[in-house]
Amino acid sequence: MARALPVVLVASVATAQGASSGPCYEPSFGANLALTDDSVAVGLPLGFSFPMPGGGTTSVVSVSSNGFVWLGTSSDPGCCSGNVMKLVTQMARIAPLWMDLDPGAGGAVWFNTIPAAGGVPASAVITWDAVPEFSQSAPMTFQLQLYADGSFITYYDPNIRSAQPPVTQVALTGVSQGAGAAANIVDLLQATLAPIDSGANPTLCEEFQFLGSFDLAMNVWTYVPNGQGGYLFAPKAGCSFAASQPFGAGCPQPATAYEVFDTVNPFDLANTALEFTPTGGGAYTAMPTTGFFTGYTAPLALGDDDVQGPFGLPFSFVYPGGVTTAIDISSNGFIWLQGGSNTDPRCCDGDPFRLVNDPASICGLWMDLFPPGAPSTGGIFFDVVAGTEAHITWVDVPEYGSAPGNSFQITLRSNGTFRLSWGGNVLNQSHNCLVGFTSGGPGADPGPTDLSQGPFSTPVGGGAPLKFTAQQGSRPKLGAVFGMDISGADPSAVFGLLVLGFTQYLPGIDLGPLGMPGCHLYASLDNVQAVTLAGSPTPATLSLPANPALSGLVLHAQAAALTAGVNPLGLVASNGLMLQLGIY
């Protein structure tokens, strides 16, 4: 559920001029450091002596592209995941968002020094602006402000919340004097209730695992020396963000069915097969079956974390929501159902969040596989038979860092059916693996299905779901116009609705009984407007008054499109969109 950002004013919090008087966000970025993937700008002069955690001072810092700052001179980029053990054993650093970032693929890292003025001490500002995670595309912006009094600020733009990091790597935020410090791992979000005091230990940190667990975005946080050698950590007062966040999912929903196997509940489908047959209504029925094509010929030259294609099919493969005549093959045990347009190998674990939000794919054994480790008789194969079948086969391909190899197969047929088959040697030993199908996202996660308990049916899929998003770079700032986009509507749809309400419904009110199966109402109907749909996307705007008293107000919005024949009511609904009004 969306939350309004609290303002914490506690008399016991020590005050430092930098933390209390500095800006919530410094727009003067300074110089572009021209960092690329896994690179460091070494020995940047601060222009002042910064009191370091654990004692001493430094007049230089080294900025890593991977979301942290060394308090001194180092060329280590810290690839690839945030790591508590490294944080406390290596040299002192501050990590706003230590993870595998790649400014070479987008955005930039900036550095600026600002002299003391108006009671605010001298500062240095490091900004990671619109930088994506490695192998991803969603831009993320965050900032670190260091002050000469030893306090510092971390700023996290709302776009980090939209990007949902970390996608593939562990992220870490915090500070440590390093050199054998005692780890101090805490839930930093609890500082919204009361400031967190690290006592005599200046180390303070939190790790964020997979599936978008980072929860500090859309806020500014202060680290203030507590007079005991540690820090007081709290939200910075007066920083009211203007932000939007999509939630829920539009309809119609894609057809999706999957199962995840982890190291506690390992793979249990060895020596089995499943046949997926279209129902004619946008879903599949999956039945246990037999069969494994063994007439594979020459192996493909796929390397580790590799995608190749397009591989042409001798027929049009129709699936709910799409059709394709070519595929891309990932070394990591799955195929993309649109050839030549997907280069992401999706290393390293099968992930439901990515499955339902990525384009259409079929996963025979999605995990970190290592084709170069297969024997000479093994590898990955693509074969076409009689113009009516295509077989993608992994033969004795080992899991990365493990043995023995895994043999499994994806079979596509010209009649729209497909089969997943597994040999007797299939097992995940150190990675989560995912088996299943999705007709493409973004969509809601239907939850896992026990694939060994067939037969079963997938959800009913359809066309692309109706989407309601903020326009790129637009925020619901007071005194400005907030721009939104309605996209994914059927070309025949001409009229729609725009809903704005004070109450959020999550997980949403099921609209199936009204004739809208798979659709949900996410916002109360406090204000309903008619809109004219003019293609995809159709822009919609909201003029916001310049009234500071509205700062922090949270609204919820949703769109709908009148679409004949899509369901009994002839209406599809979008995802919800949370709007938090603010001045930043």
Image (cartoon, rainbow, N blue to C red):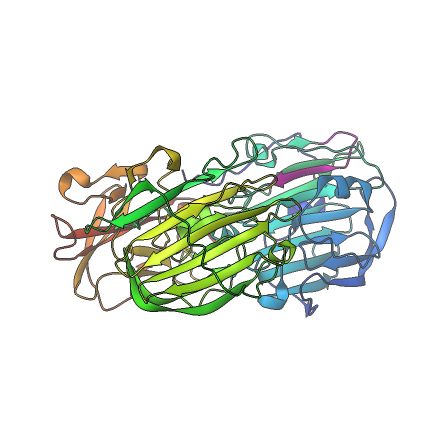
In the rendered image, the residue lying farthest to the right is 56
Q: Please give left or right for residue 553 compared with residue 94 in the image.
A: left
Vertical comparison of 59 with 190: above or below: below
Q: Is residue 18 visible?
A: no
**Which is nearer the eye, 329 or 529?**
329
Q: Residue at x 67, y 56 (%)?
A: 66
Q: Position of residue 28 (x, y in %)?
A: 63, 65
In the rendered image, the residue lying farthest to the front is 295
Q: Quadrant location of residue 319?
A: bottom left
Q: Position of residue 315 (x, y in %)?
A: 30, 67
Q: Position of residue 569 (x, y in %)?
A: 12, 48
Q: Please give left or right for residue 266 compared with residue 438 in the image.
A: right
Q: Please give left or right for residue 80 compared with residue 440 in the image.
A: right
Q: Residue at x 70, y 61 (%)?
A: 38
Q: Residue at x 19, y 50 (%)?
A: 281
| Quarter of the image that includes the N terminus | top left
Q: Please give left or right for residue 254 compared with residue 119 in the image.
A: left
Q: Position of residue 347 (x, y in %)?
A: 56, 53
Q: Is residue 291 visible?
A: yes
Vertical comparison of 534 with 442: above or below: below
- The magenta stretch spans which residues? 198-208
> Residue 201: within the magenta?
yes
Vertical comparison of 220 with 105: above or below: above
Q: Quadrant location of residue 73?
A: bottom right
Vertical comparison of 257 with 199: above or below: below
Q: Residue at x 55, y 40 (%)?
A: 427
> Residue 371: within the magenta?
no
**Which is nearer the eye, 13 or 416?**
416
